[in-house]
Image (cartoon, grey):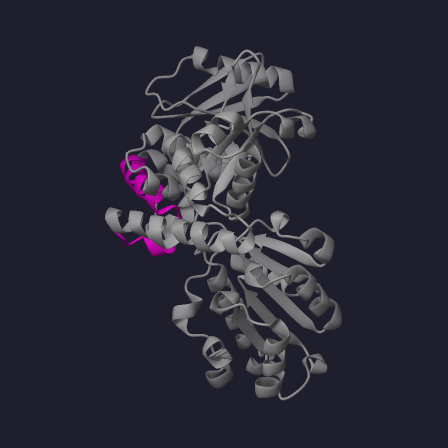
Amino acid sequence: MNLEFLNPWWKDGRVSAALVGRRRGIFHEAMAIMNVRQILAITGLRRVGKTTLMYQVIDELLKSGVDPYHILYYSFDEGRADLDGLLKQYETDVLKDDLRSGRMFLFFDEIQKLPDWPGTIKILFDALPSCKIVISGSARIGMWKDTRESLAGRFFELAVAPLDFEEYLAFQDLHLDPSRENLYEKDLKIHLASYLKTGGFVEAMNLDDAFRRKYFREGFLERVVFLDIPQAMPLQRPELLMAILRIVAERPGLYLEVNSLSNDLRCDQRTLANYLDGLEYALLIQKLYNYSKNLLTSEKKMKRLYLANTAFTWALNPQIDFSLLIEQWFVNWTRARFFLRTPQKEEIDIIHRNDQEVLLPIEVKMQERIDPRDGKILFRFLERAGISAGLMITLNAETRFEVDQRLVEAVPYWKYWTVKACLEGKST
């Protein structure tokens, strides 16, 4: 177990620039949590920058004067190490003292690969009050086995997402004026089309299309499907996981009909449910529920499935219709949990709830022209829900419809900052 290789700051007192990378806004959120007792749990897809964030935090600790020997980093991607043995080696070879001897910082990457990790980390947390523990995992923390029971009240979760479109532009050193979107229409359309293929993954930004597809199919999805998920869950047929991903990539927003899908995959319904759980656990799919004011009722209603990132969909289905990819992007961007389908088969793509807990129904209509009839379902929902505003995403049309002091705003998909303002409840 080569701890020296994973902790180069023990020798030179610094983290190399290659490991630190470029800081994102989430760095400041992480540093704020470093000042509290609770464990910092960093979650997110593989390769979104969780490890880089850890290195950035370590770099900042070193710059603030923390003793390099008091910082331990270990990735369980390197092997299923015995944590007790790891810490004893650290105490003996590096600290030359006990872990209780002062303020220590313990960073454990890809923690879900350590067997019975919640219980192990709980014991460590309770036994070492002077140690700040930071863990990361490529999985949904709510689905991590025994997490809530073992670590209740002991951790803060920080979810790292791929770059959003604004960050993507910044990482490309592209500086567009948010207040002059019309001036940059052509640029926004070109860069957004490219962004959807990269999914906001920094490593994919400078690859051509052929290598991007290979990167996501072989270097990402197949690794998660055939290695990560089977290590975490006793699934006997990981090829079914890939089959589900391909089906959803062919039909983003697929209505989950368990009988039909289990028949197509030649498996029973319980097996299908377990495999869908596995894909949710690994953050590869996004499940939406049919909206109801009663959330328990929503859980029991029909569901829709999307892949968790447009790059996954494009890599598995490069011929996908652009309008479907845009619909998925808005589902992914808003982290949508709900759609609407009434008994009369009236549908709304997304029922969004912003940070102020205000509902915003969103319909994606990639059409050149929009008229008031296109907003009638949105207006009906606004009236029933007692809210005042809805959003329609269009190809190029930009207009506003008002009925009985209720507003539906139609905005072209490429007007990123205008849409963002609507999502945040800041539209005028």
Extreme residue toward the bottom, this view: 96
Left-right relation of 258 to 369:
right
Q: In this view, does 377 lie above or below 13?
A: above
> Is 377 left, or right, of 357 in this rendering?
left
> Which residue lies at the image location 66% right of the left edge and 60% below the top edge?
118
Residue 385 covered by magenta stretch: no
Dominant SS of magenta comes to: helix
Residue 255 appears at what percent x and percent y?
49, 26
Q: In which quarter of the image is residue 67?
A: bottom right
Bounds of the magenta segment: 183-207
Residue 312 appears left or right of 208: right
One can see residue 426 in this view:
no
Image height check: is 392 above or below 136?
above
Measured as percent of width and height from the top left, residue 98 is found at: 68, 84
Name which residue lies at 61% across and 48% down.
143
The quarter of the displayed image where residue 126 is located: bottom right
> Residue 205's x, y, as percent?
32, 52
Residue 402 shows in the view: yes
Magenta segment includes 201: yes
Image x and y of residue 47, in percent: 43, 56
